[in-house]
Image (cartoon, rainbow, N blue to C red):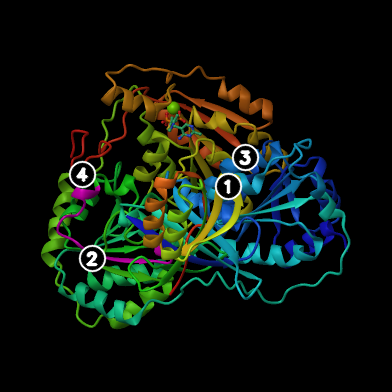
Amino acid sequence: MKHTISVIVENKFGVLARIAGLFSARGYNISSLAVSETHDPAISCMTIVVDADDEKILEQIKKQLNRLVDVLTVADFTKKEHVERELILAKVTCAPKTKAKLESLLDKYEAKIVQRKNNTAILEFMGAQLDIRQLLHELNQFGIKELIRTGKIAMA
Amino acid sequence: MTGAQILIECLEREGVEIMFGYPGGVVLPIFDRLYDSKIRFILTRHEQGAAHAADGYARATGKVGVCLATSGPGATNLTTGIANAYMDSIPMVAITGQVKTFLIGNDAFQEADITGITRSISKHNFLVKEVKDLARVIREAFHIAATGRPGPVVIDIPVDVQQAECDFIWPEEVSIRGYKPTLFGHPGQIKKAAKLIAESKRPILYIGGGVIISEAHREVKELAETIAAPVTMTMMGLGAFPGTHELSLGMLGMHGTAYANHATMESDLIIAIGARFDDRVTGRVSAFAPHAKIVHIDIDPTSISKTVEVDIPIVGDAKNILGQLLEEIKKKPDTKKWLEQVKEWKATHPLRYRHEDDKIKPQFVIEQIYEATKGEAIITTEVGQNQMWSCQWYKYTKPRTFISSGGLGTMGFGLPAAMGVKLGCPEKTVFDIAGDGSIQMNIQELMTVVCNKIPVKVAILNNGYLGMVRQWQELFYKRRYSSTKLCNPDFVKLAESYGAVGMRVTKKDDVRHAIEKAIEIDNTVVIDFVVEEEENVYPMVPAGEAINRMIGGMA
Ligand SMILES: Cc1ncc(C[n+]2csc(CCOP(=O)(O)OP(=O)(O)O)c2C)c(N)n1
Ligand SMILES: [Mg+2]
């Protein structure tokens, strides 16, 4: 099961390595990670998405995150009401034949094309995980050549 | 002031009296300042020895142990000692030199990313990139090392930061917003614990090193006597409750006493204090203490319900919580029948070994050390059979008198640790009970103790084997003794060549006399006890078994 963990930390070097180490030491892969300064430049917020089936181990990781000197708070949003967003950039084939179809799809999702070149288009979309999954599914018919995701950010 | 001056000034203000370490290129500015400092610097013969000595000093005194090494190989040589202190929650500050800030990451001469290397084996670490941060970092490092669940903190200081100038400002207060250990227990939880205690019929106290760290031994004794419950200790907890007390069951777990293991398995309430349900203690977790409710008192929330699910967790400092709990206990459980049962186990399953007239049994040597020192010595150990027998056959009555590498199980710990212990407690007789294998891992520290007149006694239980590994090979690998038979030096001559006194004992009748003589001699003494080669440590719980499934004939 995917868990979304929000960690508020000191904005210092070495902190990211410490946090990543708690996952990697157990052979856990971080599915996505978004880190940035908050309104207070001394503090950063990390949104970590991790796939963990063993609740007990995850509980242990959360406690160990809390124990780190540079960690201020740890919150697991998985079962809490929260708002989540992720931004994606996708490069798709955009031949004259399929152009209209692509554009109507993008309209439906309120996604937009940010660059066109030859027979390709880079489009951006921001949304919750479910919307992104659906859009990507529909985009498959056009042929996705490249995909970049920022990783999810979440707020409760 | 220069960075090096600030460092020494801060160390003095932190109350550091003794440091252990080894010089090198990028710590020369620090050594130059040490030359004029009132801090006593002990030059060990290996950085690992320095780390273990600082660790031993910390365990014996409760103060923060400090060690210092140069960059690269000096720093990497400290790492085993840092990991050792981390596993046993020992307050330590390890200072390392680093290459110049602008060379970091360039594969500079003797560069190692020691903050990266020690990230998972230290409580915290710092790379000081600007001299203005140095005083604050040192202050924070000592605070973090010594408070909450203690542990080692590494401070990496590039040589140009040691040389850089800045005004010295001593931070009067330390405030780290992400670090606020919980000190007092939640009153609601304590009430619930008191209720469980009153309702219990077969309670047992299971205590660990946390009791020693928090200096809660008096409260533990009061609790045990108030509710008339037997007390069992982890290896790290030995000495936290008097081993001679009638409620003491000694150590539990893999090489614990049969009665401690039976009592734990049959209890209906385990009161765990400053212990962490280590796999050497629980055996097979799913079979551990099936009838027991568990109250767990610990300052570190990550220790709670990590392996064994507990019913009532109480996070905080053991001494405070026990004080709160004792006030809350109004009704005492009736444990008369339970204590009778425990007494019967003690009578029917005592610790035993077979005496032989023509051979020295290692257990006998330890019993003799116990008697000759009247139980008043501080014992350090190496790792292996020597360590387990030291747990079983010496009775520790006070905290900080049994000093041994628990979590990491580091061979080579005992001798340098004994050096730190002796410096911290000069009036005490200090014995390192050693194995013939382990002692050779840091034997070079004989030179340090002789040279600095730190008289410790080393009792080598020389069985000619890496005995504990051989025991596993005997029991689980059809006696195929692969790489466990040792070729040993002449330990007597070796001791003498370091300037220590060497003795060899081959007859049972000479054991006591040799120990007494060693205690009298005002020098480091190495006694080579040539003991029974294939003696085993019993009882023994095979790995992965329930702890009442002991082997060893007597279980
Ligand atoms: C540094 C290190 N390496 C390896 C081990 C694994 N080990 C545990 S006990 C032991 C044998 C110790 O032999 P010795 O010191 O002679 O003690 P004995 O068991 O014979 O009393 C070994 C190799 C260890 N604990 N530490
Ligand atoms: Mg041996």
User: Which residue bears the numbered disc 3?
Assistant: B48
Could you tell me how far apart the alpha carbons at marks 2 and 3 are, in whole angstroms? 41 Å
Q: Give the spatial CA distance, label 4 vs label 1.
A: 32 Å
- The image shows residue B228 at horizontal and vertical percentages of 22, 68
Q: In the displayed orientation, state which residue is furthest to the front.
A: A97
Q: Secondary structure at mark 2?
A: loop
Q: What amino acid is found at the position of numbered circle 2 in the picture? A: Ala
Contact flag, marks 3 and 1 (Cβ < 8 Å) = no
User: Residue B244: image x %, image y %?
Assistant: 33, 56
Q: Residue at x 15, y 74 (%)?
A: B199
Badge 1 amino acid: Ile
**Residues at discs 4 and 1 both on one chain:** yes
2 and 1 marks on the same chain? yes
What kind of element bears circle 1?
helix
**Which dot marks residue A150?**
none
Query: Is residue B299 one of those drawn in magenta?
Result: yes
In percent of the image, x 64 and y 39: which residue is there?
Answer: B76
Disc 3 and disc 1 on one polypeptide chain:
yes
Tag 3's secondary structure?
A: helix
Callout 4 secondary element: loop
The chain letter for the residue carrying disc 4 is B
Indicate which disc, 3 or 1, sits on the residue closer to the N terminus.
Answer: 3
Task: Tell me which segment is drawn in magenta.
Answer: B285-302
Residue B520 in sight in this render:
no
